[in-house]
Amino acid sequence: MADGERPPVEPAAMHAHLARCEGCTAYQRSLGVLASATAGLRAETPPDLAPRVMARLRRRRVGAQLALRWAIAAAAVTELAVALALAWSAQAAGQAAHESH
């Protein structure tokens, strides 16, 4: 009602209620004051954020891909180190067994 919208109840019933309810009358007045105070305000249209958001997502994707590549490389180096350690251990065990005969 304060902003020009049609009330969800019949205007006559609403006016009758406001005539006997001081709290609702005060609330209606405050809405009217608020509507009057903000009537001339216009919200500025925000800039198009889509290009900035997409660029940020691309940077994150590139960063994630780089991190994944480093993780795969680290796993490969770890596997190689374990394989070399096992091979060296097996060779040492074989050599010790050969020397004991």
Image: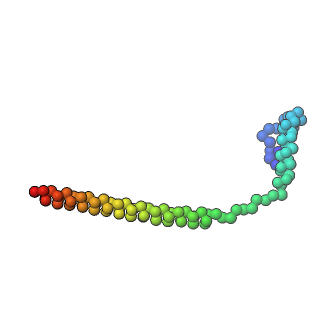
Q: Quadrant of residue 13?
A: top right
Q: Residue at x 35, y 63 (%)?
A: 77
Q: Residue furthest right?
A: 19
Q: Is residue 21 visible?
A: yes
Q: Position of residue 60 (x, y in %)?
A: 53, 63
Q: Nearer the viewer, residue 93 or 8?
A: 93
Q: Is residue 12 visible?
A: no
49 left or right of 82 in image:
right
Q: Position of residue 84 (x, y in %)?
A: 28, 62
Where is the N terminus found, in terms of image quarters? top right
89 left or right of 58 in image:
left
Q: Position of residue 79 (x, y in %)?
A: 32, 60
Q: Quadrant of residue 94?
A: bottom left
Q: Position of residue 19 (x, y in %)?
A: 89, 35
Q: Nearer the viewer, residue 59 or 78?
A: 78
80 left or right of 31 in image:
left
Q: Residue at x 80, y 44 (%)?
A: 6
Q: Residue at x 68, y 64 (%)?
A: 47
Q: Nearer the viewer, residue 61 or 50?
A: 61
Vertical placement of 9 versus 46: above or below?
above
Q: Residue furthest left?
A: 101
